Image: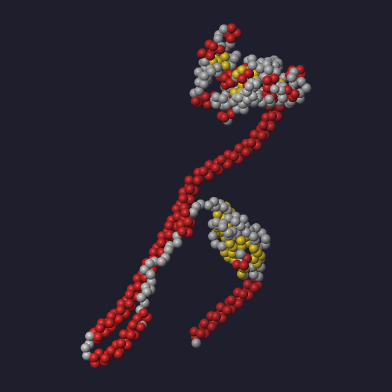
Amino acid sequence: MEGELKCPQCSEFYVKPVLLSCSHNLCSGCAHNLQDSVDKFLPQNDENNSDQGDYPELDKLSIVSETDSGVVCNSRPNSYISTPSIHNLFLSSTHLAQGCVYGIKCPVCRKVTYMGETGFQSLPRNRVLDIIVEKLGDSTKKAENVTQKCELCDSENPKDATVVCEQCEVFYCETCRENCHPARGPLAKHNLVDSKKGSDLLRAKLKQKDQKCYEHTGEVLSLYCLTCKIPMCIICHQDGPHINHESQAIGAMCKSHKTELSQTLQALSEKAKTETEFIQKLKAMTERIPSNCIEFEAVVVAQCDALIEAINERKQELLDFVSAEQEMKVKILKDQAHSCTAHLQKTTSLLYFCIEVLKESDPASFLQISSSLLNRVSAVDQNFFKEIELVPRVSPEFELTLDNSPVLHAVQTMNFFQMKAPGQPSILPEECSAENNSVTIAWQPYPGSVVEAYTLELDDGNGGDFRVVYVGPEMMCTVDGLHFNSIYNARVKCQNHAGEGEYSDLVSLQTAEAGIYSQCMLENHLLTDTRRLLEHLRGVV
């Protein structure tokens, strides 16, 4: 609760905390430093400038917020402005500040507390907070070896206090003691104590001091005004500002408020316990993130490696296809070239032979073979393009294009997606069956769902509780060993890392009757025995 024990102005532990009218607290020294003339907190009427500049808009109800804080301040002389009645709630801020000399603007809510001539010294002391700070703050100060600071130093770094006045209850350094608490006049009778013993002295004095009425200093605060919600003495109730107000004994009211606070704290404690458990859960989840990240990275690497391996395999297949295409083209062109070469050799031989025949000078000898030779050459000439193709059977170019754009686009757009719990699967009635005392159930996942496993459940055949009979990735399951002549209800659900989906609709399957099963078994045995007898007779023959 360290945050509750530190002043909002200096961010240090409270030193003699005082209450403002807005129920916030300040150190006495911080209140002294923050107090200023009341004129600084009132709006300035400037006919030439309707804008009020930096002057705050006074909250008219902040003056009466003291009635909600339990602070006794309404009738003390020289205190901040007295508690107004209902008809005074909406008076102007100027009227509310009449008779006040000083003001303090709260550093938390910016509301202004007005005070009389004694300034911050008229603010009520928050005794409960003071005791808690002294009790829990001393151990911290001793552990950190923190010394008490002067409460009247104006600088941001006050000097160490050397003495404390038992009557004024203020810590002074040597300079401030000489300036503010000289040992003369009425202050000469004050008892100055060493600052190291001053804290214990003031704590003991605070515990021994009764809570007295600020207006009737001899009266103890014995009643609690239910209208103003502040403690009061019997005189204030009988003949004072709280006359005719409803009241209750301060002890009973204190007990009632403590009981109410305890009950509220109990409910708040349960909520704090829940939040604590949630924080522990968050911490445990945080600790699991590194290991989960390593596992997930391994999955990503494995998937990418699988893609690379698939691409390499496909690349090799494509290269093998190209090699086969190359060999096929070369073989076809070589065979065509070989065929053309053989035909060309036959034609060339005929040409050379005819040329040699034309060189024959003997007409009789030439005419002896010229007719047949002429027919032969004419036939070869006419059938020349029929016997040979002068067009390549295949193209030397590879007239193929590798279409990798879909795969490349898929790789470039490959990304993570948020896995959700799978949808409701569907049982396929047309593929389900019941045979003898076993049933077979088939199902399919919800379209687009990522499923890691399925859970199949059957009831007991009498409409009882379901039990798990299969967990795995398959989408068909046969369950044996069921009761005969029973109707079984089946359902299936999907699951993945994100969670489990809803159950499918029920499907009902009825097993066979026991008599029919016995008859079927008997027929199977007879068929088996007959088959064995025929095989035996065939062997004898």
Give residue 257's position: percent from left, percent from top. Answer: 69, 29
> Based on the displayed image, in which of its 4 quarters is residue 438 positioned?
bottom right
| Camera-nearest residue between 320 and 387 | 387
Give residue 506's position: percent from left, percent from top. Answer: 65, 61
What's the colour scheme? secondary structure
Give residue 43's position: percent from left, percent from top. Answer: 64, 22
| Camera-nearest residue between 118 and 288 | 118
For the N terminus, which image quadrant?
Answer: top right
Vertical position of residue 412 compared to residue 265: above or below:
below
> Based on the displayed image, in which of its 4 quarters is residue 309 positioned?
bottom left
Q: Is residue 535 left or right of 167 when viewed as pictured?
A: left
* Res 114 visible: yes
| Camera-nearest residue between 305 and 461 | 305
* Res 74 visible: no
Vertical position of residue 76 compared to residue 441: above or below:
above
Q: Is residue 416 left or right of 78 when viewed as pictured?
A: left
In percent of the image, x 61 and y 61: which residue is there?
426
Residue lying at the far left of the rendered structure? 361
In percent of the image, x 36 and y 77: which residue is there?
389
Give residue 330's position: percent from left, percent from top. Answer: 35, 71
In percent of the image, x 56 and y 25: which residue is there?
9
Q: Is residue 360 left or right of 97 when viewed as pictured?
A: left
> Based on the displayed image, in which of its 4 quarters is residue 6 positioned?
top right
Residue lying at the far right of the rendered structure? 244
How many marks can you see?
A: 0
Residue lying at the far top of the rendered structure? 185
In percent of the image, x 54 and y 60: which residue is there?
473
